Each structure stands twice: as C-alpha cells, then as structure tokens.
C-alpha cells in the first residue's frame, strides 16, 4: 500500500503551532503587566491596613463597571489599529451618539429604537472616516483629528444647556441603568465568591467573543491583518482594501455608538463634551494590550487586559488616596513601556 507523504501535513502543523505560539507570547506581556499592577496596589493597600478596600469584591465591581465604556470602544479601536489605522474621533463620536440617543428618548421613542439610533450614528461617523481615509487616501491621524472637532461641534449644536441634553427621567428604564450598576439587582451571579457585576460587563464579554470570531475565523479578519501588515502587498494579493477599510471603520463606529449608550446609562443624559480625552484611554488600552501602531498586530484578549490595567490603576489610585497626577503618570509610564516593547519587536522583525 502506498505511503502518504506527511511532509505537507507536518509543515501545516508547524505553521499553526508557530502562529499559536506567537499569539500566546503576545498575550503574555499584557497579562503579566495586569498581574503586576494588581499585585502592586494589593500590597500597597495591605500595607495601609486595607483602609482603601482595594482587595474586595466591591472594588472589583467598580473596576468592571467603569471599564465597560472603554472596553466596548477599545474593541472597535482594536480592529482599526490592527489594520494600520487610528481614530482620534472616538471620544466625540461616543458623546455624539449618546446625545442622539438622548434626543430620541426626549422625542418619545422607546429605549430600544433610541439605542439603535446611537449605533447608527456611530456607524455613520465611522463610515465618514472610512471614506476619507480609504477612498481619498488621506492620513488617518490628521483626518480623525479633524472629524473629532466636527463631531464635537455637531454634538454641541444638537444639544442644549451648555452641550447637554437630558431626556425625561422615566424614559431611561432601570434595566438600562443596571448596565453599569455597582450592585446589580437582581444579582446576575448567585455564587457568593464571585463579584456580581452589572450586565454591561457580560455584554463586553459577548462583544469580545464576536469581535474575536470576526478577526480569527472569517475572511474579513484575515483581510484586516493583511492590510495592517502591508497594504500594498494585500492589494496585490486581491484583498479589497477600500471595501474592507469601510467595513472596519463602520463596525468600529457602531461599537463607539454603543459605548455612547453606556455613557447615557451612567449619566442619565447626553453630554457632547463628556468624551473628550476618551480617545487617549481607548488607544492606550489597545497599545498596552499588545496592539502595534504600525498595524498587523493586536488581539481582543490583549485589549481587554489593557482595559483592565487602566481600570485597576484608576481604582487603585482612588483606594490609596493618590492624586490624579500620580495616576496619570503611572498610566503614562505603562504606555511608554508598551510602545518601547513594540518598537523592540519591530526592530527584531526587521533585523531578521
């Protein structure tokens, strides 16, 4: 009986094993950084006698619910950064979407259609960015810097009372506000040894699974990585670059719009200026999580680790009574370290 040649199969397995090894290695850094940050604040709180209650289920709940908006927006930014792009308009897009949802509620729409309006608004903002970047071939950094101020201006125009718009109190149902409730009622987890997070945390996990599936189990995901690795090469290989970029920015925009709904649920109103500065946290979460600003690298799990690092630093600084500037410096140090590691990785790849 003829023997089958196992060389191609062995080569396939070796290639898959190498890819998995690289993914595991890329996740090791953000995960270790997260554990180090948690250990640092945990020991610091213990040294102070535990007065900050950092080592408690309540502290974990706060980190969870405060991370929901950043995490949802960071999932969209992960797609953009892997493709080699950037979006500085994420913060004002989130706020504009929240204002649109608030206007819809004040106009008498039910909460579900209002949420749909916010998502459509975010997707439209993303589509505009995608057209300017992919069709007109303009620099993403400059373009989204411009649309950031445009979205801010639109938000201030449609809002009132200094850029805010408050819908009727009874138009925001309790189940929506429970998305970011510190102690949800009813409890979503019955076991006492696990924190009972607001359901927004579980929404983040579901969205993370969807985005991860898009990236790693679809042709679209392969196109995203291909464009980020080398756009000219991807175009020569038949990748529909323009169409893919439009999809990337539109999907990311829809996630930004959903993050605007989270902001509405937390504040009970739309605020056109509430998202200013959010872009720094969102981009930082992706970069800390191993995303490369030159494109071609990034992961959903890494982004979630980056989001949690930011949340832990914020909560830990509050628990220890540190000044805001200390929190900013700690986050800045971690961002610089993440960018430095990425630069070393790029030099290693280029050097052989």
Image (cartoon, grey):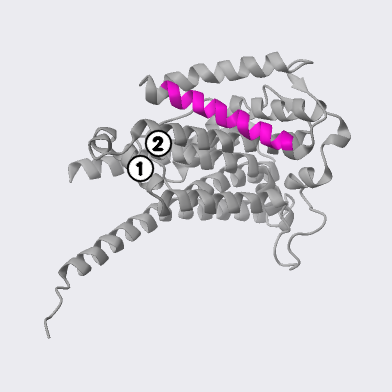
| Foreground pick, 27 / 207 | 207
Residue bearing the label numbered 2: 244
Asked if the residue at tag 1 contacts the one at tag 2, i.e. Cβ–Cβ closer than 8 Å, the answer is yes
The answer to which image quadrant residue 166 occupies is top right
Spatial separation of the CA atoms under disc 2 and disc 1: 7 Å
What residue is shown at x 37% (from left), y 55% (from top)? Answer: 23
Q: Of helix, strand and loop, which one carries label 1? A: helix
Residue bearing the label numbered 1: 223
- 302 magenta-colored: no
Task: Estimate how packed mark 1 is, as few (under 14), some (14 to 19) or many (20 or more) residues with alpha carbons within 10 Å.
Answer: many
What residue is shown at x 38% (from left), y 26% (from top)? Answer: 134
The segment highlighted magenta reads 113-132
The answer to which image quadrant residue 94 occupies is top right
Q: Is residue 66 left or right of residue 133?
A: right
The answer to which image quadrant residue 186 occupies is bottom right
Q: Residue 223's x, y, as percent?
A: 35, 42
Q: Of helix, strand and loop, which one carries label 2? A: helix
Kindly give the residue lying farthest to the left in the view shown: 2
Residue 217 visible, this angle: yes
Q: Residue 89's x, y, as percent?
A: 53, 25
| Foreground pick, 155 / 276 | 155
Residue 334 visible, this angle: no
Task: Estimate how packed mark 2 is, as few (under 14), some (14 to 19) or many (20 or more) residues with alpha carbons within 10 Å.
Answer: some
Q: Main secondary structure of the magenta part?
A: helix
Residue 53, placed above or below residue 147: below
What residue is shown at x 64% (from left), y 16% (from top)? Answer: 154
Q: Residue 119's x, y, as percent?
A: 63, 35
Give the position of the N terminus as an image quadrant.
bottom left
Q: Residue 231's x, y, as percent?
A: 29, 34
What residue is shown at x 69% (from left), y 30% (from top)? Answer: 98
Residue 151, placed above or below residue 339: above
């Amino acid at each position: 009986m003829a023997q089958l040649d196992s060389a191609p199969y062995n080569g396939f397995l070796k290639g898959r094993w190498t890819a998995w090894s690289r993914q595991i290695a890329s996740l090791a850094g953000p995960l270790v950084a997260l554990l180090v940050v948690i250990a640092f604040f945990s020991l610091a709180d213990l040294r102070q006698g535990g007065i900050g209650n950092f080592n408690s289920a309540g502290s974990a709940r706060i980190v969870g619910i405060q991370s929901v908006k950043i995490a949802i927006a960071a999932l969209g930014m992960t797609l953009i950064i892997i493709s080699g792009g950037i979006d500085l308009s994420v913060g004002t897009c989130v706020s504009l979407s929240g204002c649109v949802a608030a206007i819809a509620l004040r106009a008498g729409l039910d909460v579900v259609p209002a949420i749909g309006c916010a998502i459509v608004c975010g997707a439209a903002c993303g589509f505009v960015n995608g057209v300017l970047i992919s069709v007109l071939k303009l620099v993403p950094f400059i373009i989204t810097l411009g649309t950031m101020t445009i979205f801010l201006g639109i938000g201030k125009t449609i809002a009132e009372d200094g850029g805010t718009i408050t819908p009727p109190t009874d138009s925001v149902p309790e189940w929506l506000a429970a998305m970011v409730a510190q102690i949800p009622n009813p409890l979503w987890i019955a076991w006492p040894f696990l924190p009972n997070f607001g359901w927004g945390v579980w929404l983040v996990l579901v969205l993370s699974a969807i985005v991860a599936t898009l990236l790693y189990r679809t042709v679209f995901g392969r196109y995203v990585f291909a464009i980020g690795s080398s756009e000219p090469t991807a175009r020569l290989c038949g990748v529909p670059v323009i169409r893919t970029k439009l999809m990337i920015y539109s999907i990311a925009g829809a996630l930004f719009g959903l993050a605007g709904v989270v902001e509405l649920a937390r504040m009970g109103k739309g605020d056109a200026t509430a998202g200013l500065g959010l872009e720094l946290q969102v981009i930082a979460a992706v970069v800390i999580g191993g995303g490369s600003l030159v494109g071609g690298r990034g992961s959903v799990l890494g982004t979630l680790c980056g989001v949690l690092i930011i949340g832990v630093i914020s909560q830990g600084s509050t628990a220890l009574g540190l000044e805001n500037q200390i929190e900013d410096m700690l986050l800045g140090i971690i961002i610089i370290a993440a960018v430095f590691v990425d630069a070393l990785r790029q030099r290693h790849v280029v050097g052989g």
